[in-house]
Structure formats: C-alpha cells, structure tokens
Image: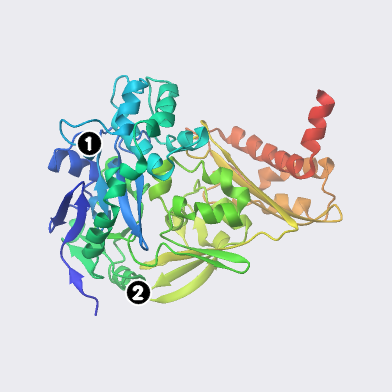
C-alpha cells in the first residue's frame, strides 16, 4: 500500500516551506504576492503570455539540479513539491550589491517603466546560468515569453550579452550553493503520495505511475495537471473549480525519454524543453516548430502528453506526430492499450479515452531515410503565438512518383486531422507542379475550417493549399530555380 504524506514541501528562496493546507487552484504568483508578500513578480496577463511573473524553479533531474524560468501566474503551488522556487527578491541581499543580471540591465538601460523588468531579469538569469556567453539567437529565444512595450528589446539584448562582464557564473549563489540545495531537495523526497484537502480543494501528487493509475481510476472526476500551461487559464480566465487536482509533473518516470531502434517514446510528463535535445537528434525537421511552441517559460513547463491528451484542434505536436505514425499508450488502473494517434481524436472535446484513463506516453517512429518531412506553423506573430493552422507533410518518392503521402493539419477542423483526399490525389502521380495543382482542390473536401479571431476560413484554406506548394518546392529545389529565373 502506498504511504501518504499530508504535507506539501518545497524551498522558497532560502526558506523551507511545509504546507498542510493549500487551495488546489492557488497560483504560485498569488502565493508569492499575497501570502509571502514577495511583490517583485508582477501580474500582467494572467495567462502565461507576458512573462512579468517569471520566476525560476529548480528541480532534480537525476543527480543534476536544473533551474528554469516558468510563468508563476498559471503555475499552481501544488506542482512545487520537492522543488526550489527562486523569486527576483533572492538575487541579491538587502542593501547589498546588485546581481550581475540586474547591474547589466541598469547600465545598458534595459528598463523603462519597469513593470516587466523582474520577469525579464529572471529569464536572463536562467539563461546566464546555462549559457554565460549566450548568442544573440539564444538570448532572443530566452526572451520569447517576455513582452516589453517600452524598450524595443535592443538594450535588453545588450544587457544580456554583457552579464558575464559583471560576474562569473561559478560565483553565483545558485551555483556555489548547488550541492547544498540538492541535498535539501533530496531530503524532501520520501517516495510518498502527497494528499492534502478534500473536494474542490483536494491536491494529490501520486508517488509513482502505478499510483497515478490507481488514484485516477478511483477519482476519474479529478483534473490531471502537468505544466498547467492550459489548465492554468481555466482558473485565471474562466474561474473554474477543477479540483480534485492530480499533479503528474513530479511523478517519477513520467519525464522519461526512451530511445529505441526506429522510434522514440516520450512519457507524458516530458516537457518541450526536456524533449528538445531528442527532437534535434532524431527529428531535425521539427526543430524550428519546437522553438516556436509558446515562449521559453511555456516550453519549460508544458508537456508533450498534455498537448495530446487535451485534444485541442490547434495543438502543435499532433500534426507532425500524426504524419510520423505515432501511437499513444493509454493507462487505466494499470491496464494499458495502444491507439494510433490519428484515431485518438474523435470529435471536438472528445477523445478515445474513457473516465479514469490517461495518456501515459506517445511513441514516435523515426522518419526513414528515403522519406521527406516538413512541418509549418502559421501564426499572427512569429514567436509565442497559438497556431492559426499547423501543417505536417510527409512523402515517399520512388522514381519521381509519389509512393506514399501523409498530410495532417491542426486548426483546420474540430480535431487534428489528416487530409485523406489530398493524399489520395498525390499517390501514384509524378511529383510535379501539375500533380500539386491537381491535388489542391481536394483540400476543400478534407477541410471546412472555421473563422475565428486567429484567421478566417478562407485564409486557412488558402494557407493550407500554399503550404503544400511550399513543401513541393522545398523538396525539389524548384523554388530556388524559380527565384533564379525571376531574378
């Protein structure tokens, strides 16, 4: 029988916290500002977009302690068991010298109104610890999730490049004291299930995957919470009571990446950041897409499994994973079954998942060497934006003829969906401009997209058609040839 602990334990700055009572929907930002009176973190958007609330959270990954920036406004206190939370107040002692990140921001005029500055400082702090001599691209990527209306970002980038001239990472307290913090965090880990509260204010953190299966089978009305990049908005924007909340982000084994011959299995708790090295090495065609999923804070918290499990028609991972032939492993009370990802999505808000059953992992086959794959994300702005549509294209050619084709889109229907009619129009035909143009009308058979705030139905359909043209040009070099002819 699983042992139970009725206490949530974590470290806040240099203070060990033990909570026996906590609202299931208490956000980390409200806890910092209202309960602990730490008001450096600001609430700008309350939906994980602006980054003014950013803090660092350190978690043990094996024997390593890794600090990453997250959005406190949509992160729940219940997700922090065994973690080290670092707010902007912890960067320098009272009346002491400023931290190198802070001093660089001052000297390079990286702050004007100052509202967003604490969050920017924390994002740059997290980057500096990992990349003391960060490139311009790394700095811009780290700041994707931080919005500033005053500076134009140039002084912030200059400050980021100058941080190491104000101090060495090795002398930073979070680095110098890392072994001590690791020991304290390890001491907080006891392998027990955390169980606090009742009803809508019930917080449960299972002790293992098997314990998660047992808990969710017993409480199928509960809400599974991983990074809360979606669920957090249910609370901050829609004021929903969603307890009991079952937090899976710290369940041992749920963050594993298993690389096998011909496939990679991502457990449901693997974050986008955690998956990034494997994506780069095994699915390089998806690197550009991966770097545009949310901002850095969202990628540090959001998980692959949740992106699939919630069945959103505009999730970024389903289209490419569908094109690759991914399968989902579902777990109900310890009984597992596999479902082809494209069959998991049934209708809007409905998936092939029964009460008490959860997504445990997704297995993605590696693209064969003789096939080509591309994925395109269309948004109103390049960074940190939700897709208007996202299309994945896969083709296998034999002697210039299409042997097989898989096309999958998000944002074009009530669920992520394959373009069966377009695929049929391509297979068996020469891979040519004529074939592409002949297949274009079939998009209207496969999709009848909606008009909403992100795009009109007409735009979505035209964009999808043009993405097929783009894929053809990129796979054949025809685009470069046409550019030369026009020039």
- Comparing labels 2 and 1, the label whose residue is closer to the camera: 1
The x and y percentages for residue 423 are 72, 53
Looking at the picture, tell me which residue is in the foreground, 341 or 414.
341
* The furthest residue to the right: 399
Q: Residue at x 32, y 55 (%)?
A: 59
Quarter of the rendering containing residue 62: bottom left
Quadrant housing the N terminus: bottom left
User: Which of the labelled discs sits on residue 388, or is there none?
Assistant: none
Quadrant housing the C terminus: top right
User: Which of the labelled discs sits on residue 210, or is there none?
Assistant: 2
State how far apart marks 2 and 1 are (Cα).
43 Å
Side (left or right) of 239 relative to 393: left
Callout 2 crowding tier (Cα within 10 Å): few <14, some 14–19, many ≥20: some
Q: Residue at x 22, y 64 (%)?
A: 187
Label 1 secondary element: loop
Residue 223 appears in view: yes
Q: Residue at x 68, y 39 (%)?
A: 465
The x and y percentages for residue 50 are 36, 33
Q: Is residue 328 above or below residue 440?
A: below
Side (left or right) of 395 relative to 116: right
Looking at the picture, tell me which residue is in the foreground, 11 or 463.
11
Side (left or right) of 21 relative to 40: left
User: Which of the labelled discs sits on residue 92, or is there none?
Assistant: 1
Q: Earlier in the sequence, mark 2 or mark 1?
A: 1
**Number of numbered callouts drawn:** 2
Label 2 secondary element: helix
Residue 409 appears in view: no
The x and y percentages for residue 344 are 52, 62
* The furthest residue to the bottom: 1
Looking at the picture, tell me which residue is in the foreground, 174 or 477.
174
Callout 1 crowding tier (Cα within 10 Å): few <14, some 14–19, many ≥20: some
């Amino acid at each position: 029988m699983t042992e139970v602990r009725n206490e949530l334990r974590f470290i806040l700055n240099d203070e060990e916290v033990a909570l026996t009572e906590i609202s299931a929907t208490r956000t980390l930002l409200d806890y910092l500002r209202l309960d602990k009176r730490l008001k450096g973190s600001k609430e700008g958007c309350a939906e994980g977009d602006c980054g003014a609330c950013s803090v660092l959270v350190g978690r043990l990954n094996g024997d390593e302690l890794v600090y990453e920036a997250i959005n406190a406004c949509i992160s729940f206190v219940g997700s922090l068991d065994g973690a080290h939370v670092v707010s902007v107040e912890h960067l320098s002692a009272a009346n002491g010298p400023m931290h190198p990140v802070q001093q660089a921001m001052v000297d390079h005029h990286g702050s004007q109104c100052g509202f967003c500055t604490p969050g920017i400082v924390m994002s740059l702090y997290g980057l500096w610890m990992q990349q003391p001599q960060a490139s311009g691209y790394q700095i811009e990527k780290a700041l994707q999730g931080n919005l500033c209306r005053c500076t134009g970002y140039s002084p912030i980038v200059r400050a980021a490049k100058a941080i190491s001239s104000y101090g060495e990472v090795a002398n930073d307290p979070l680095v110098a004291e890392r072994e001590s913090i690791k020991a304290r965090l390890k001491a907080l880990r006891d392998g027990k299930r955390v169980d606090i509260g009742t009803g809508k204010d019930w917080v449960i953190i299972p002790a293992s995957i098997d314990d998660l299966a047992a808990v969710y089978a017993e409480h199928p009305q509960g809400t599974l919470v991983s990074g809360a990049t979606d669920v957090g908005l249910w609370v901050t924007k829609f004021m929903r009571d969603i307890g009991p909340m079952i937090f899976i982000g710290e369940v041992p084994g749920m963050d594993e990446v298993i690389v096998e011959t011909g496939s990679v299995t991502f457990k449901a708790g693997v974050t986008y950041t955690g998956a990034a090295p494997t994506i780069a090495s095994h699915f390089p065609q998806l690197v550009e897409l991966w770097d545009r999923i949310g901002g850095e804070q969202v990628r540090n918290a959001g998980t692959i499994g949740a992106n699939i499990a919630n069945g959103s028609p505009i999730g970024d991972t389903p289209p490419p994973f569908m094109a690759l032939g991914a399968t989902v492993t579902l777990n109900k009370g310890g009984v597992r079954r596999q479902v082809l990802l494209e069959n998991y999505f049934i209708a809007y808000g409905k998936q092939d998942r029964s009460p008490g059953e959860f997504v445990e992992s997704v297995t993605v086959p590696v693209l064969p060497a003789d096939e080509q794959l591309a994925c395109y994300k269309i948004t109103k702005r390049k960074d940190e934006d939700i897709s208007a549509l996202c299309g994945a294209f896969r083709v296998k050619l034999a002697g210039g003829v299409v042997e097989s084709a898989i096309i999958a889109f998000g944002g074009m229907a009530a669920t992520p969906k394959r373009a069966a009619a377009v695929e049929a129009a391509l297979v068996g035909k020469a891979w040519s401009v004529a074939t592409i143009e002949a297949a274009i009308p079939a998009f209207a058979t496969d999709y009848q997209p909606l008009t909403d705030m992100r795009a009109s139905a007409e735009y979505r359909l035209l964009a999808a058609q043009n993405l097929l043209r783009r894929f053809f040009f990129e796979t054949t070099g025809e685009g470069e040839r046409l550019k030369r002819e026009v020039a």
